[in-house]
Image (tube, grey):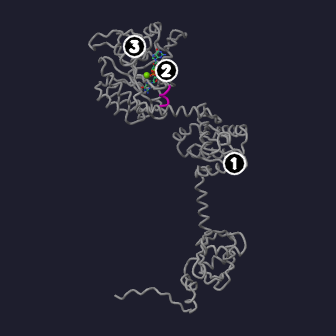
Amino acid sequence: MPAPQPLRVVSTNPSVEADPVRRLATYFDGLDQGVIAIDRRGRVVVATAPARAILSGLGFTATTGSSGRDLLRILAAITGSGLRDGFAMLRRARAEEGPQAFETVTAGRTIALRIHPVDGGWTVALEDMTEVRAREANSAELARIDPLTGLANRLMLRERLSASLDRLNRYGEPCAVLLLDLDRFKPINDTLGHAVGDALLEKVADRLRSAVRSADTVARIGGDEFVVIQAGAARQEDVTILARRLVDLIGRTYIIDGQLLTIGVSVGAALAPKDGTDAERLLKHADLALYRAKLDGRATFRFFEPEMDVRMQARRRLELDIRQALARREFVLHYQPQLNLKNQSVTGCEALLRWKHPERGTVSPADFIPLAEEVGLIVPIGEWVVRQACRDAALWPDTVSVAVNVSPAQFKSDRLVDMIVSALATSGLPPRRLEVEITEGVLLQNNDHTLDTLHRLRKLGVRVSMDDFGTGYSSLSYLRSFPFDKIKIDRSFVKDIATAPDGDAIIRAIAGLGRSLGMTTVAEGVETEEQMRRIQAEGCTDVQGYLISRPVPLDDLMRLLPRDPHDNPSAPGVHP
Ligand code: C2E
Ligand code: MG
Ligand code: MG
């Protein structure tokens, strides 16, 4: 096999051999890139066809031997000065700074240049970037727009907000940030479908756009969350006027697909510089104000106030504390006995959670369970309650059952039934001695999953009670949706029994309902002998309340329970 021949450039022009620039130029000729080689005096040695095309498109010519002025003019255009500066630029490339790259817009075209010093001159690579840059600009623009509504997105919001804050810093021009969240958008989306939800969002966006001035920015930053940057808002009144207009405008009826729809909006506002001078802080403060607006009944607006931050921090601390409470074993269960009126014996006890906080003291469940539910911590806490209650109840007489309160959030988790099975198995408590108390909140998420869970619990032998009966919207209809074992009549009805005219009519009706449905009826919150007497007369089967006993620690409870399960249990009659 013949040895491979080294590649050799053959030139027919003897002068080319002598001059390195000219020799280099021969390599470039025929390239499909725009390259110009120029010698030390600035004369064009060679220009590739694409380079000539680019230059002629700009109204210049570059042929071999021409002075290179056209190129220098382009370089001058970059520096924004005369030809002399064009030369200066070439020299810079040769001097300490090495290859130079530039981009310039000349005669409506965007031209990129790269200048390389070579022996005896320079090479300049030219590229027409006009289309590339246009495409980039277009996609950069698209990357800043919310595709559904055409409003600014998060990215553009950030840029606009930082530009506004820049103006604040430089010229003292104030601005306001309004954070908007549609009220109950999710149900519309869920029940009427995403197409209707999307159409509604588009119309909301149109109304927002129409409500602001051209210097303001409207952005969509989440499903149903919007932000308005109000430029030049110096006084709170300026913001009030806009916020009021937004709440009013968004709250007007929409017609979508021939249907009439209404939706509200809540607005939280923060002012720069008063409430912050950086984007992060302003948005956070507007968010706190929005939270307040939501709490205050929605379809309204609130301004940020420093106390909101304090309250929120307290909440966050509480959340943190709740997270740690389980590990630190700060939770305990107290038990409140229920007395059966027929045989005057304790038939069950309700487990009520107590939190022994090292600094806060004993915290009432009313103060931390709502937050624990909101942040999902009720699931692990509730599991602890069930396991502990089963363990404790396993020590009680066989005739006494234990009731635990189970929150709606626990029903959302798939593990509830498995967890209860496991708690029963490890404690050895027979399922019939466990009772689950649920409130209307559980059935409000009245889906098949909830009912399926309840039926599975029933199949295990666990009993199910309806707690706080009568306080909800449609307690009666819930009684039909599931065959409860027990109805717990809310304390408020018991309170009225001896005082309000006809105060006992409701108790009588519920007791009758329970009798005909075969459900036990427990009156909650019985505090006086008089209440007790009347409740008994109305036909409730059981009572629970301070009159029998307050909720007490396990040790105290043991004294209230009959010692031997085979003894004939007697009424405890103890009032600790
Ligand atoms: P609930 O399930 O309706 O519990 C009855 C509440 O009434 C208890 O309040 C109890 O101490 C109180 N009470 C009982 N008898 C009387 C009385 O004669 N007079 C008055 N004024 N009050 C009486 P507590 O222990 O503060 O619990 C409040 C609520 O917190 C409970 O209402 C329940 O909804 C919830 N809760 C308690 N423990 C747990 C738990 O382990 N898990 C869940 N998810 N919720 C719990
Ligand atoms: Mg209860
Ligand atoms: Mg209750």
Residue 197 magenta-highlighted: no
Residue 370 magenta-highlighted: yes
Residue at 47 percent across and 23 percent down: it is 361
Q: Are marks 3 and 1 in contact (CB under 8 Å)?
A: no
**Magenta residue span:** 367-372
> Which residue position is annotated with label 1?
169
| Residue 127 located left or right of residue 463 | right
Q: Nearer the viewer, residue 539 or 123?
A: 123
Residue at 62 percent across and 47 percent down: it is 219
Instruction: Bin the neighbour count of mark 2 within 10 Å (Cα to Cα): few under 14, some 14-19, many 20 and up.
Output: many
> Which residue position is annotated with label 3?
541
The quarter of the rendering in which ligand 2 is drawn is top left
Instruction: Bin the neighbour count of mark 3 within 10 Å (Cα to Cα): few under 14, some 14-19, many 20 and up.
Output: many
| Residue 314 located left or right of residue 389 | right
**Numbered label tally:** 3
Q: Is residue 355 above or below residue 274?
A: above
Q: What's the distance in space between the residues labelled 1 and 2, CA to CA?
A: 59 Å
Chain-order first, disc 1 or disc 2: 1
> Which residue position is annotated with label 2?
470
Residue at 37 percent across and 13 percent down: it is 340
Q: Position of residue 1 (x, y in %)?
A: 34, 87
